[in-house]
Image (cartoon, rainbow, N blue to C red):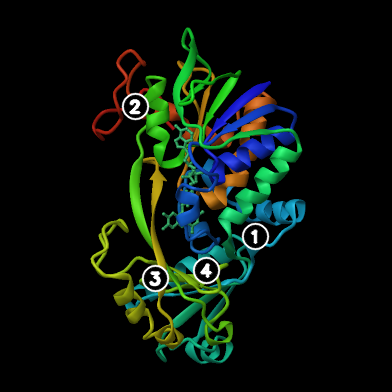
Amino acid sequence: MRIVVVGAGSIGANVAYRLREHGADVVLVEAGAPAGGTSSSSFAWLSSFPQMSWSEEPGRAALRRTVHPRFHELSSELGGDWIHWVGTLTWGAPEERVALRESALTCRERGVDLDLLDAAVVGGRFPGLRVDDDDEFVFESDSGWVDAPALIDRLLARFQAQGGSLRRNSSVVELVRSGDAVRGVVTGQGETIEADVVVNATGSWGSHLAALAGVAIPLDLVPGLMIYTDPIDPAAVPGCVLDAPTWLSRPDPSGGLAIHWRGEGMSKVHGANGWSAERILADIATTLPALEQVGVARTSVGVRPIPPGGPVVGELPWTPGLYHVLSHGGIGWGPVWADLAVRELLQGEDVPELAAARPERFYLQTPAIGRFADDAEQTPLVTA
Ligand SMILES: Cc1cc2nc3c(=O)[nH]c(=O)nc-3n(C[C@H](O)[C@H](O)[C@H](O)COP(=O)(O)OP(=O)(O)OC[C@H]3O[C@@H](n4cnc5c(N)ncnc54)[C@H](O)[C@@H]3O)c2cc1C
């Protein structure tokens, strides 16, 4: 089977690699450089807490349990220094403590290994962190962060070594059609690449690629600020992921810290940020005093592709041959989506856990009408 995967971010790189490994003839087409999209401006955190306490539809909840095991397997399979199981220390604002404790207990019941720690223990175990005496903490050891560009690099090296073809600096500008079906892509350079299936792994550009086939896949685009500091003495800050009430921090391969600010001065959806990076760093330095000694090396804004109602995985029955894999949390979910693409595209399965992820959910009526299910008072024809 010949498959064109469009987009070489975390999702496209995982999907292309896994499809090739299972014998498909795969061409991966990337508009710019691999990992040049959201995947390079991501906090790239892997954690089960608090996610495993969420009430989710059963399919997604079942798949979520496979995210961490799949990363452990991928790390042995690929080797390399792209995954850092350093653990995560979480604490909340005073008004969040009860909820935090409850969600920690639920996660534990669901098998997540968590330690509940008080400030005295944290003070001794995580030097460089200034905490309040009444703060309460949760430590998840089986969590950490991914160097997403390094992972993508590794996946693509394997993909190409196994005979997969990568086209860089090649934008897909048109889809080849045969009746209703999608049967390939046309690039900006005028190259036509025919295929049995085209995978839409274009992240934040996903609605645009779908539109080339005349189908409407909605995405919420939610920008988030990343701040990278100058190199910092590793002994002066905790080496784990810190999940504080208004920010997240982790080590960065550059030797500094990578920080995602989600606190004051931002919209409720992590959008526009009213504070400068320097001011944010100064604010965080009240908790991590070592930051007083370093400056901002660079910042970047990543654009999260968030399909309303959760991930979109699958094809619309009326555009066979165009398989969408669009999701938030695409660093963590990438390997799982790749496995499912193999099962559905190469092994002919209809994976039941994906029932709620099908793009039909956006349609109220037949494709001839093709309206969005954005009005709660109208009932979608296809229900999750
Ligand atoms: C601040 C921030 C923090 C985040 N934190 C986390 C986290 O902690 N954990 C987590 O799992 N996720 C996190 N995410 C989300 C995660 O980063 C994204 O879900 C993931 O990177 C999306 O990967 P992707 O492959 O879908 O998209 P991308 O990485 O954007 O890749 C899509 C690629 O498609 C290419 N493309 C687009 N259009 C075309 C075309 N027409 N032709 C050819 N190529 C095309 C683009 O050039 C791009 O390279 C975060 C995101 C942000 C912004």
Of 35 and 50, the residue lying toward us: 35
Measured Cα–Cα span from mark 1 to mark 4: 31 Å
Residue type at numbered disc 2? Pro
Per the image, the residue denoted by label 2 is 380
In the displayed structure, 3 sits above or below 255; it is above
Residue lying at 29% horizontally and 23% vertically, measured from the top left: 371
Per the image, the residue denoted by label 4 is 105
Secondary structure category for the residue under label 2: loop
Measured Cα–Cα span from mark 2 to mark 3: 38 Å
**Marked residue nearer the N-terminal end (4 or 2):** 4
Q: Quadrant of residue 378?
A: top left
**Marked residue nearer the N-terminal end (2 or 3):** 3
In the displayed structure, 351 sits above or below 73; it is above
Of 215 and 55, the residue lying toward us: 215
Q: Are marks 2 and 1 in contact (CB under 8 Å)?
A: no
On residue 82, which mark appears?
1
* Residue 376 visible here: yes
The location of residue 42, given as percent across then percent down, is: 47, 57
Residue lying at 53% horizontally and 87% vertically, measured from the top left: 236
**Marked residue nearer the N-terminal end (1 or 3):** 1
User: Marks 3 and 4: which is nearer the front?
Assistant: 3
Q: Is residue 160 left or right of residue 300?
A: right
The location of residue 143, given as percent across then percent down, is: 59, 65
User: Marks 1 and 3: which is nearer the front?
Assistant: 1
Residue type at numbered disc 3? Trp
Residue type at numbered disc 1? Trp
**Marked residue nearer the N-terminal end (2 or 1):** 1
On residue 247, which mark appears?
3
Does the beta carbon of the residue at mark 3 sit less than 8 Å from ligand 1?
no
User: Marks 1 and 4: which is nearer the front?
Assistant: 1
Measured Cα–Cα span from mark 3 to mark 4: 23 Å
